[in-house]
Image (tube, rainbow, N blue to C red):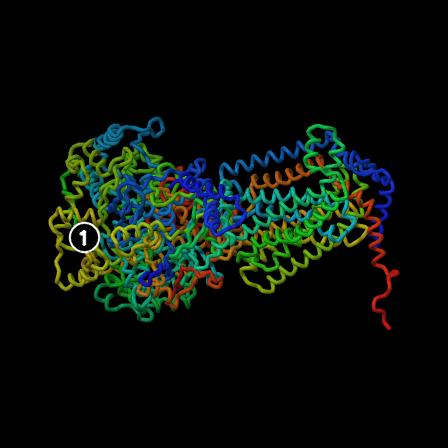
Amino acid sequence: MTESAKPAPRWGMVVDLDRCTGCQACTTACQIENNVAPSSAETADKGRSIRWMDQLPYMEGEYPNVKMRLLPRPCMHCDHPPCIKVCPVGATTKGADGIVAQIYSRCIGCRYCTTACPYTVRYFNWYEPTWPDDLAQTLNPDVFVRPRGIVEKCTLCHHRLQNAKDKAAAERRDLAPGEYSPACADICPTQAIAFGDLDDPHGEVFSQSRSPRVFRLLEDLGTEPKVFYLREGE
Amino acid sequence: MSSAAEALNVGLAAGGAAGTASENGGHPPAALGADAVLLRPILHTTWRFWVAGGVLACVSLWGVVAYLTQFRWGLGVTGLNRPVYWGIYITNFVFFIGISHAGTLISAILRIAQAEWRRAITRSAEVITVMVILFGVGSILIDMGRPDRMMNIFYYGRFQSPLLWDVTSVTCYLTGSTLYLFLPLIPDIAILRDHTTPGLRHTFYRFLALGWTGTKRQHRILEGMISVMAIIVIPIAVSVHTVVSFVFAMTIQPMWHSAIFGPYFVVGAIFSGIAALILAMALIRSIYGLQNYLKPIHFNYLGMLLLVMSLLWFYFTFAEYLTTFYGSDPVHMTVWWAKIRGPFAPAFWTMVSVCFVIPVAVLSSRKRRSVKGTVIVSMGVVLGMWLERWTIVVPSLSNPRLPVTDFGYFPSWVEWSIFLACAATFTLFYMTFTKLFPIVSIWEIQEGREHAVREVSERVKSYLPGDEPEVGGAS
Amino acid sequence: MSPKNRSKSLRPSTKTPKSTSDSVKLGRRDLFWMVPTAAAVPALLSSCSRPDPLPPHWASGPKLPSKAGKETWVSSVCGGCPGGCGLRARIVEGRIVGVAGNPLHPINRGALCPLGVSAPHVVYHPDRIRGPLVRRGGELKAATWDEALAEVSGRMKDLRSRNLAHTVALVDGNRGLAREVAAAFLAAFGSPNHIHGRPWNDSVPGEALKTLQGVTLPAAYDLENARYIMAFGSGWLEGSSSPVATARAYALARRGRKTDRAHVVHFEARLSVSAAHADEWVPLMPGTEGVLALGLMHMILREGLEDRDFIDRWGNGFEFLRAIVLRDYHPDAVSERTGVPTATIIRLARQFASKRPAVALGDEHNGPGAQTVEARMAIHALNALVGSVNAPGGVLSPPQVPTDPLPTTETDDTGKKGLAMAPVGGGRSDGVTELLAWQEGGGSYPVNLLLAYGSDPMGVLGGGERVRTALRRVPFLVSFSSFLDDTAKQADVVLPDHTYLEKWQDDPSFTTRGFPVLGIRQPILKPRFDTRHSAEVLAELARGVGGPTAAALPWKDFKEVLQTSVKGVHRSARGSLFDVVEAEPWVETMERSGWRASNLGSFDEFWAGLVARGGWWDPIYDFGERTRALRTPSGRFEFGPLAKAVEKAFPGAGTGTERGAPSAPSGFPLRLHLYPLLAAFGDSSAPLPWVQDVLGREMELQWGLWVELAPPDARTLGVTTGAKVQVESAEGTVEARAKVYEGARPGVASMPLGPGGAAGEVCKRAMLQQASALAAISRTRNAMDGAVWGDTWVRIRKA
């Protein structure tokens, strides 16, 4: 490492719940961007729908003082991910940029990571994914279709990072802030999902992740999630 | 003391009959006398064996069909879902590995402790171990989403993963146990070699007998090796179930992340192992008419062991559940309540009654520690320990930290079929073993008659105040 | 390097040591080869026999299109709902492989909702109709376009020749030019029956707004600048006619300003997603929103908190209303009717009147809902009461997009005679309900031919079996749908339209701040099937009918008509092409102060820009132009009609009952509350599995119909979540799964309205199938109501 070498960015996300309306465009955009096969009534009934970006409903209180909180929930891309430790074949790794990735071709489908993840954000391909007829035409050519029997998860649209990096490299420059963001952040109608380098003091996520409204999911577990939430209210 | 004396008397009585014949000893054919009954299952096979074997083979084949279905379509054919990613296969994995503690561990402990009553039971116990580990390992392989990538474990294996600890430990255990089963088999194989006429079987035994002639040197080496193996195998066995528990305990999932899981699982394993052994012995005894070898006294002793393990198991269970309850971490309590009065309550309370209430009630009385009594209790314990694994694996997964819609998990026909087939195939293998090798160690029984009685009486004598001059007498 | 090559290249290094390994001594030189060997063994192991990442027998998944090929992005406008969001389609090798929001489009600024994201699936949907269909022997059979068109135009010609031109009705789900084409067609043909065929007031104002303000265009709600938002009834965040725009405005109201985070209060029978995002959720009895609004009004008036300025200058008939409200709508009485505590009514009335700008949202904003016109008027009058009409943070009246109208043509005598007939339902904006009442015997003449033009009146819109029965009485039914929706299934001829990504179309709309927007929809790829642009089909039909009808629509290519019409915008020399967000405030300031005049360039440049950027808009709202907002004959906000309606409709909330009041009929103890989910409710959406997957996520019982019950009600019924139940009304029965929901008001059973459109192969058991079933159990209390699923009471039994 030379001194001039910039440290790798720590990609992270801040979800402002005061903006979020619970429309779930992020969920759908993610599924379509990442070639997640559509669910059906059967898969949904069995609890096998794959939603890398899900919406968690939290209910509190009793009628009429009921509160419902809807949390968009991607993979937390923990700094200390419990899933990586347990993988027997090293099929899940954390890169220098902090993205917790899954090596699809190595995964043996033991589902240890899915059980070890306290956020239950890892999904398993119970069957070979299928698309109704022509709908397969709309598959995103940038993303691998996962075969049955392996675990998959939110990649923070890693292919977009790769594309952005390639582009920057071809133009002989550094990756500019804002050049790379995942599909969920891009699509959000309310811009509730901010994305960027958590260590870049000039970036939006830097300041937002230090907001007094900030919290993280299951923070006490010490997993150091890189997805932050801003709670509702003033 | 009384039991030791009894063991002694039995040995004397049996030894009296065969005494002269065995003095000629060695090679060619030793006269087996009354012990010839032990060779009968090997030399004579009734139609009943074929019928039973056929039925079991059908069940096994059905399991193969079920597995092929799963292989063809994926794990979707199971009842598993998100968040219950693990179900009956992992339950079986823990269960089978637990049962495997019947053999090697008990046999090794009894050998080291020089418990003379072990002689008739060690073989049947050790066979359970070897056979059942296969299904423990098999369950893991069946559970894999991509069995075709099994070799990745060796290419890319990471020792950080508790699953790899399992792979290592179970492999050692399987190797050790097989060796530990095989070593004491050698003299018996030699006997079989001497009692068979040239042919396929004879060749088979001759090959396996490794040229055993029963010389003093051979005996010395064999016994030396057996004692070494007995010592080696104990820590391996303990480690196996410890790391099996670590698969769960190393995660931070509610009610899995517990420090006592290691010993808790080991105790549970021995507990279920003894129960399985009792069942196996009872079956062998009645089917092959070995009432004279597997006596009520054996069941009585094993019953006592079972009682001890039941108490120990309850102690751990109690400690585990009380700690969770008293701590009242809401995440853990969700799982806790799911077991105590939620959807898993039937399984949980069945487990408590058949693993603790019934065993203690039945086994605490000498009278009820009969063959029948212990068998009934053992059936309950085997069931209960399966349920214990079930209530460890499934409830925690059903109630993860972050709320996930609970879709409920119930195994599909594929899973039940594979479970049944595992049990059937195990039984089939076990039966087949009894048709190839004596299920009660002949030479050890003989040895018991020839040497142990004397040894034991000398040993007992050495415990008592005798003629030796007092050391450092008080003045 | 392939694994094979690698293993070959490594082999020599493993062989060499073997030949020298006789030596027992381990020298330093031996280490030389030992180290590489030790390293080579695992490498060999992994390179020789590493399992193929995707062995052939696993690779049965869909073939991934290769990435090679040019990638292009094309702008267009989403057609999933009336929202009018701009999108950009990503095209690789002639396939649409994804869409993104158009970052320049002022309505959505790069964002999309789940329906928008799924746009490509509409095009590639397996349930699409692949060519014209004609009913022969009771079944729909494939036909050629000539056959199908001749069939329809023959009938029309025949009707016209028998002086029955007026018995042709057209239910219109389009807006913009396609709607104008239909109007021109009918005007020339001679039918007054141009019926609004969508559940949203996206191109015509709702009856309440029309009555009180006399406007001809729907209203924009400037939520972005509101400090206090009070929402009545169904989910204004999920189900509004422009969900992305509403959501954006919500976010800006919440966190767009440095201070003054907007306060949101929501009245609804259940804790909906919208209610969950409010600062305060007030459960009330469904159907009493109007009474509640009047109760709030009572408090505002009693405490003198109303905006006297606005009322004096721009109100009409206020004193009449004031007297009635003060007489009849005492909070205690209102509380009794609505179930909202008196103290809450008082507190919220004070808040609403004092934290301005405040805005009240009813179904006039929300779109599909169950509020009566009277209730909508009462809610809208609250806006006038606090001066939030044509004011920042209030209800705005966006100006029309200055497109050129279609050239008008004269019709002949037959046509004139037809046009002179009374239109179905008096031409009100809630057309399909009118059509229903008409068909059920309220009309003076039967409808003989119905054209379902971009609309599915038999679907969710119409009220299920009842509407189906009524519309089946129409002897000849023509559908223009791209999918086999409820109407198409019953149709005699289906003339399938392109999907919205395959055709040219204009999409006039407006932003929440009342800025007019013209989105341009262009074909992103060639039509995949033998379908035709509906407007062009109308022109073909006109040619088939001949005479003045043919003369009215003399063109063949809709794109030409569109280009001609857009010339008006160019000529207006106002506004600008879609531009980056940063430019917006800049342009606004400049134009306001007269420093900048639009420069749209030559028409060709303008057109090219429109197509490339996605459209045109005019980021100016002139608050001074009151005449646009208040177009009643008096030029004022008419409180009178409300007063009259209130006097009639809710006679004395304390003593009498509201019409169709919330009192349970015997045997049906639960009030049914139907609520829309997302924008997925409507007539233009195909059953999209990915959208299905997110609908009702918070209820955790997706992909099927559910009925929400309050825990006490569920206990009485002895049902738990997931149990199958029968929901029975006087009208019919529907099966659903029970959901015991803490956020449900006791005494109310809530059910979601699924998306409209056809239930096809893709979403077999999707809830959209039950949408019509649902409608079957709900009933219209009055044909004058805005919605057909008004006042329904049900009982629930375990299935």
Q: Position of residue B466 (x, y in %)?
A: 87, 60
Q: Is residue B318 above or below residue B163?
A: below
Apparent side of residue C511 relative to residue B364 in the rendered image (left or right) = left
Quick one: C784 or A47, which is closer to the camera?
A: A47
Instruction: Please say whether residue A73 is visible from this viewpoint.
Output: yes
The residue nearer to you, when weighing C435 against C480, is C480
Q: Quadrant of the N terminus of chain C?
A: top left
Q: Amino acid at mark 1?
A: Leu
Identity of the residue drawn at 57% across and 50% down: B166
Which chain contains the residue that carries disc 1?
C
The x, y position of residue B230, in whole percent, is 69, 50
Query: Where does residue C631 sit, x and y in percent of width and height?
Result: 20, 56
* Residue receiving disc 1: C577
- Residue that protrudes farthest toward the right in the picture: B467
Residue located at (53% from left, 49% from top): C25
Report whether residue C363 is seen: no
Residue occupying image coordinates x 82% and y 44%: B449
Q: Secondary structure at mark 1?
A: strand
Q: How many marks?
A: 1
Q: Is residue C210 left or right of residue C709?
A: left
The residue lying toward the viewer, choosing from C51 and C544, is: C51
Q: Is residue C208 above or below residue B428?
A: below
Closer to the camera, A69 or A222? A222
Q: Is residue C166 left or right of residue A209?
A: left
Residue A19 % position (x, y) = 35, 60
